[in-house]
Amino acid sequence: MARSQRLALFDLDHTLIPFDSGREWLLFLVERGAVDAAVERRYLESCRSYVSGRCGIEVLHRAVVTPVGHTAEAQIARWSREFEAEMARRVPRSTLALVASHRDAGDRCAIVTTTTRLVAEPFARIFGVPHLLATEPRRVGGWLTGDIEGHACHREHKVTHVQRWLAAEGLMLKDFERSWFYSDAAGDLPLLQAVTDPVAVRPDDRLRAVAQERGWPVLGTADVAF
């Protein structure tokens, strides 16, 4: 049996936070004059291409990571702390309280997000979540290449990332008497279906329909005040 008998997993963008963290990271860099203002436009173009099915998640990852590909790790770390301080003012108290309620109950907590680790780490610190499963950026010689290491933490691969993380600690999902996953998107259905307690948070239309059909809890603006 698991050392902690309950597991709480959280998606990040539009679930714990009411915005796109990748875009906010790029805007943060633009405001500091660290990157050209055109990076946000290119990112939004990539988002539209992804939504339309014209490109994969790799293009979004590259749009976020490539602008700092030739930046020293120490500088990126400084920006990460500054970004954390700015974003801490924008995180909803309701989702901070949601995560805290699981932590206080002794549940094992993790953020499971498609977002690159580079951007997601500041939010894991803000929420006080000790485990972060994210898309891993590839580095060569200490420099970010814009590519992804292994599979992106996306769709069905979120399940793989969770299983691999738990296996490293000698655990499996079935070891937990209860397991939650909070998400806003139908793309997360593989992991939502793998836990005992799936929760839809301000869901997209497809996820809302599935949640209503299966009787899953649906949290909206009255429950998670964005």
Image: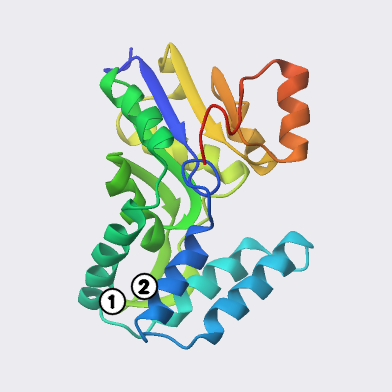
- Residue 25: x and y in percent read 43, 67
Is 215 situated above or below 148?
A: above
- Count the labels in the image: 2
Q: Is residue 44 above or below residue 162?
A: below
Q: Position of residue 5 (x, y in %)?
A: 34, 14
Picture quadrant of residue 44 = bottom right
- What quarter of the picture does the N terminus occupy? top left
Q: What kind of residue is marked 1?
A: Gly
- State the SS at label 1: loop
* Position of residue 150 measured from the top left corner of the image (x, y, whole percent): 49, 58
- How is this picture coloured? rainbow
Marker disc for residue 162: none
Which residue is at the front of the view, 142 or 33?
Answer: 33
Q: Are marks 1 and 2 in contact (CB under 8 Å)?
A: yes
Find the distance from the CA under tag 1 to the CA under tag 2. 5 Å
Check disc 2 and give the amino acid type.
Arg
As helix, strand or loop, the secondary structure at mark 2 comes to: strand
What residue appears at the point 45 percent right and 14 percent down from the top-left corner?
Answer: 178
Q: Is residue 206 above or below residue 150?
A: above
- Left or right of residue 154, residue 31 in this image: left
What residue sits 72% from the left and 34% below the top?
A: 207
Residue receiving disc 2 = 139
Residue 28 in percent (x, y) is at 40, 72
Q: Nearer the viewer, residue 89 or 99?
A: 89
| Residue density around tag 2, few if under 14, some if 14–19, many if 20 or more, within 10 Å | some
Rendered image: mark on residue 142: 1
Work out whether 83 lies above or below 41.
Answer: above
Q: Residue at x 32, y 52 (%)?
A: 88
Mark 1 surroundings within 10 Å by alpha-carbon count, few (fewer than 14), some (14 through 19), many (20 or more): few
105 sits to left or right of 209:
left
